[in-house]
Image (cartoon, grey):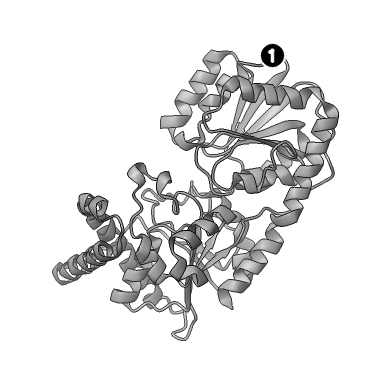
Amino acid sequence: MESYISSELPYLSKTFDSVYIVPYHEFTFEETSNRLAHLPFENIIVLKTNLLPRYSPLPRIERFFDTLKILALEMILTNQKAATFQKLKTLFFRIKHYHAIAKKLSLFVSKDNSISKQAQFYCYHYWNHDGVIIEKLMQSRFQFRPQKSIARAHSIDLFHNDWPKGFVAFEKLKLKYLNNIFAISQLGLNYLHRKFPLQSPKFELAYLGVPDMFKGYTQFPKGKFTILTVSNIAEIKRLHLMIDIMKCMPYQQFQWVHIGDGVSKYSTPLKEEAKKSGIDFKFLGHLDSNQIHQYYRENDVLCFINLSYMEGVPVSIMESLMHGIPCIATNVGGTSELIDDNQNGFLIATDFLPSDVAQKILDLSNYTEQWNLFSEKAREKYLAGFNSDKNYTEFFKKLIS
């Protein structure tokens, strides 16, 4: 479900001879429905990790002791000993699962005749999550020796207040095993430097980015104004609040369009609530990156909105800025590194009043000159630091340097 890894694939394909994507939380991998099942890159393969190998008695004992070793090391290193102790059982079963993935990956590497024994391996963790522990298990038990191991750090994989009860597992273990951690926001980089000053040489800033698909500035929208949201339909995105915002504005002048899908647990109630409210809305479902850019080019979008209560540096906002569309977003994570308040959009508090956000939308729709100025500033912000060709080329050069 990680949509934005696709924007890095051309650079991965160009930099490396072979690329293997490991979706280690993909418990129901379906070849036909997986978004990366039909990649246009011959040297990129998505591995199936839900069909894991069985263990005979001796390897089962080895897995048990490998798991205990990591748990013991976590208890020694962590600053959250009380919370870690409470979650020992959960962590134990998580590590057991990761051990099975590590075994499957190692078997794959050892049996693939196309992989030379002298090949240089690089491990790149798109999130600074537990994939690092999988890699550690591969190294210690299955003799896997990468040339370098790095991770990006976004938000929920970095900040304690993004997790229930402020618990982040294996925090210092990841620092110990990784060569570098690349924060995707200046906020995240500052956090790492403050919290782990002795490890500061490992930390760098590496913004994500989007390709420049700009086809010229959009004219001020005419007719019914479109308010656009782009995200997975999930609790963290708080899309139900869009309904409250829309109800504060004249129905005949505005429509809400959402691009993205999600599990039925969240998407079905949202659609039902929007339908009952009487607002003008469209849910377009999942669109790939090219289709999203096409939508921007073919439709007059008044503004882009992000109501998440937690973010890194949202790629969806980068896409909007690239097209010169003003943005309204909650001031969380690194969002303020994209939106300059009252210049290319508006930053709003996480506990905003729907009527206040509606008023900002009305202001944009009523003042053409302000909208045009915001549009120019949005484009300038993108050009200043969020072009994917520049950012990803530099990022992968650093990885192999």
Where is residue 379 drawn, in percent x and y? 77, 46
Identify the residue shown where x is 66% and y is 68%: 394
Q: Secondary structure at mark 1?
A: loop
Image quadrant assignment for residue 170: bottom left
> Farthest residue toward the bottom?
118
Left or right: 145 as drawn, with respect to 4: left
Above or below, comparing residue 371 to residue 204 in the picture? above
Q: Nearer the viewer, residue 363 or 106?
A: 363
Look at the image and tell me whether residue 40 can be seen: no
Identify the residue shown where x is 70% and y is 25%: 361
Where is residue 56 drawn, in percent x and y? 17, 67
Where is residue 62 drawn, in percent x and y? 19, 71
Identify the residue shown where x is 57% and y is 25%: 242
- The residue type indicated by label 1 comes to Pro
Above or below, comparing residue 36 to residue 225 in the picture? below
Image quadrant assignment for residue 8: bottom right
Identify the residue shown where x is 15% and y is 68%: 61
Which residue bears the numbered disc 1? 250
Where is residue 227 drawn, in percent x and y? 68, 28
Quadrant containing the C terminus is bottom right
Left or right: 336 as drawn, with respect to 273: right
